[in-house]
Image: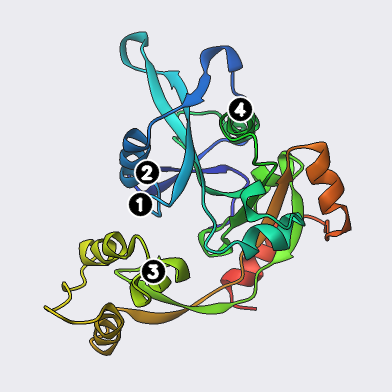
Amino acid sequence: MLTDRTQRWRDRRNLFVSGDTMIDPSRYAVDIVDHTTARAFISDHHYLPRYPAAQVAVGLFGPGAAGRPALSGLIVFGVPATGAVITRHTGFRDPAQGCVLQRLLCLPSVAANGESFFASRAFRLLRLMRPRIEAVVSFSDPAFGHCGGVYAALSGAYRGRTRPRQVLRIAGETISDRTLSKIRNLESGHAGAIDQLVRLGAPRPRPMEHPRAWLDRCREAHILTSARQSPLFTYCFELTRKARRTGGALPRLAYPIRSDVLREQLGA
């Protein structure tokens, strides 16, 4: 559904708020939150309920019951699937100079322009917590009706669309290439990656079964299924002068519009 209203999520269901509402900054605060709190909030409300490989989580706190502040939004800055995500879209040679905005969520109680208010302050906190990070890459998924309007409002550099690719999914959730690589190659964290797939419905590996063979077995049983992921719209936020200079040679394209989202949804 395409609409001029602002899309929000609560209890993993999409809702919309009027596009002409304005946030009152005096009623909100933005602060770092612990990953346990952030993980529960994402699991309860976001359409992608799995908590990503996070570095910093930032919460938006608004009016709650009995006048107490309540968590009304969340931004999670995380680790990219590969270092190339950072180097390709920021121009930095060192992937540690960038991160990915993995989750951005505001509840329907927040006014329509809440995301831009929230994100601009979250960037400041990110720089305080991780001074080495100078740029943030983010993606919007037209399959869910997103073209990145909030990123345009924040003057993020639009880099274009990713290439369509085949991905593996379980229970409707895409499993990242990095997760699959950890499992196949017995890298650090592979046990947690296996647990993630088991929680989504995969059987546990058999005794003495190599994780690579286990993945093959899950695919043969159609537990892990192949699917085509449509192109994503890619943005970069250059947070420092150095980042703006470094990214100066990279594309800064005209922002996508609603018809671009519709074309992606129709598979054009």
Looking at the image, which is closer to me, 150 or 210? 210
17 in relation to 117, above or below: below
Residue type indicated by callout 2 = Ile
Do labels 4 and 1 touch, CB within 8 Å? no
Which circle marks residue 128 in the picture? 4
* Residue carrying label 2: 42
Mark 2 / mark 3, whichever is N-terminal: 2
Mark 1, secondary structure of its residue: loop
Residue count near mark 1 (Cα–Cα under 10 Å), binned few <14, some 14–19, many ≥20: some
Do labels 4 and 3 touch, CB within 8 Å? no
Residue type indicated by callout 3 = Lys
Which residue sits furthest bottom? 220
Residue type indicated by callout 4 = Leu
Residue 223 coordinates in the image, percent (x, y): 26, 79
Which circle marks residue 49 in the picture? 1
Mark 3 / mark 1, whichever is N-terminal: 1
- Would you say 126 lies left or right of 73 here? right
Residue 184 coordinates in the image, percent (x, y): 36, 77
Do labels 2 and 1 touch, CB within 8 Å? yes
Camera-nearest label, 2 or 3: 3
C-alpha gap between disc 4 and disc 2: 23 Å
Q: How many marks?
A: 4
Mark 4 / mark 1, whichever is N-terminal: 1
Camera-nearest label, 4 or 2: 4
Q: Tell me the residue at 32%/16% (across/down).
A: 65
* Residue carrying label 3: 182
